[in-house]
Amino acid sequence: MEGLLTQLIDRCRPFARSGKVANYIPALEKADPDALGIYILDRNGLHAQGGDSQVPFTIQSIIKPILLLQALMDNGEEFVRSRVGVESTGKPFDAINISNAVDQEILSEHINPMVNMGAIVMCTLIRGGNYQERFNRLLELTRKLANNPDIDVDEEVYASELATGNKNRALAFLMKSCGLLEGDVEEVLSCYFRACSIRVDCRDLARIAFVLSNKGRDFMGNQLFPARYAHYVNAVLMTCGMYDGAGDFAVTVGVPAKSGVGGGIMAVVPGRMGIGIYAPALDKKGNSVAGIRFLRELSKQLELSIF
Ligand code: DON
């Protein structure tokens, strides 16, 4: 397997040249645009890695499926569904998903947990006395899913997001104005920005993806959440995880996945494996160029598509 990974890394690395490292959050611009790393964990406990798999990066939007899981575990499916819909927006991750937002019910149907508006609402659904407590529960869940107690926040990226995240502020205030967001907007946003700034590597993502691929059970056999929630999260990842690139990704790769502007992609191959990728040069939709290319080739070689 590692031979195949090395071969695909060499073949896919040059594709990064057509992308660009995210710079709208200034601290992200320091990443090496040529980096490409991969880690795979399969159902037989076999793992394989290649390239820059040990380089740390921030999880960014890949926290969204974990936020969804936490919201489901704290509130149940029906309540979460009533606050954040499941339809694909077909729009960029930070889009204003309704131009004439007047009513909470209409707005919640137009967002999903994988776009920023939905993820910000999900921060309000985490149980806890204050936002420090809520965030800590999310961080603990992330550590548990990755079986890595050392996972923590990149404070530099957090400060950078907090200072420049005015589009997210606009989205949050819009939702507040129509009753979809409760509580203090800055507190909710600080939870969202901290969540995006959690530092991981490819192995962490592969392990988290593995639990989702294995109906909520980790590689040591512990049931971390109900199988039904893995079903829910994977279905939303399939249709919304790659934003306005989800359709193309379904056709060319064919597995539930989530990207982040830090350059990560987490891919879930149901019943088979979890995959973590890092390649920070992004396409115009905010998805990793070399990462998608790699997954396309890997899917062909290993027949990963669920279709
Ligand atoms: O909301 C933001 O701007 C970021 N912290 C996360 C966005 C993101 O990763 C989108 N993914 N491709």
Image: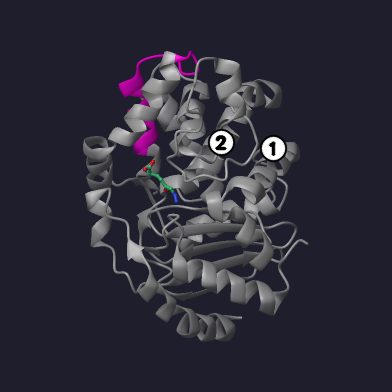
- Residue 195 % position (x, y): 40, 38
As rendered, which of 242 and 197 lies closer to the eye?
A: 242
The tag earlier along the polypeptide, 2 or 1, is 2
Out of 224 and 87, give the one closest to the viewer: 87
Q: Is residue 167 visible?
A: yes
* Vertical order, 81 against 57 (above or below): above
Image location of residue 210, percent across then percent down: 63, 56
Q: Which residues fall within the magenta stretch?
A: 178-194
Q: Is residue 74 above or below residue 266?
A: above
Instruction: Determine the residue positioned at 61% across, 61% down.
Output: 249
Badge 2 local density, few (<14 within 10 Å), some, or many (20+)? many
Let me know if residue 110 is in the magenta part.
no
Using residue 58 as the reference point, say whether residue 144 is left or right of it.
right
**Image quarter of residue 132:** top left
Q: Quadrant of the C terminus?
A: bottom right
The answer, for residue 218, to whether it is visible in the render is: no
Disc 1 on helix, strand or loop?
Answer: helix
Q: Nearer the viewer, residue 132 or 252?
A: 252
Instruction: Identify the residue under disc 1.
Output: 229
Q: Residues within 10 Å of mark 1 (few under 14, many from 20)?
A: many
Label 1 is placed on what type of residue? Tyr
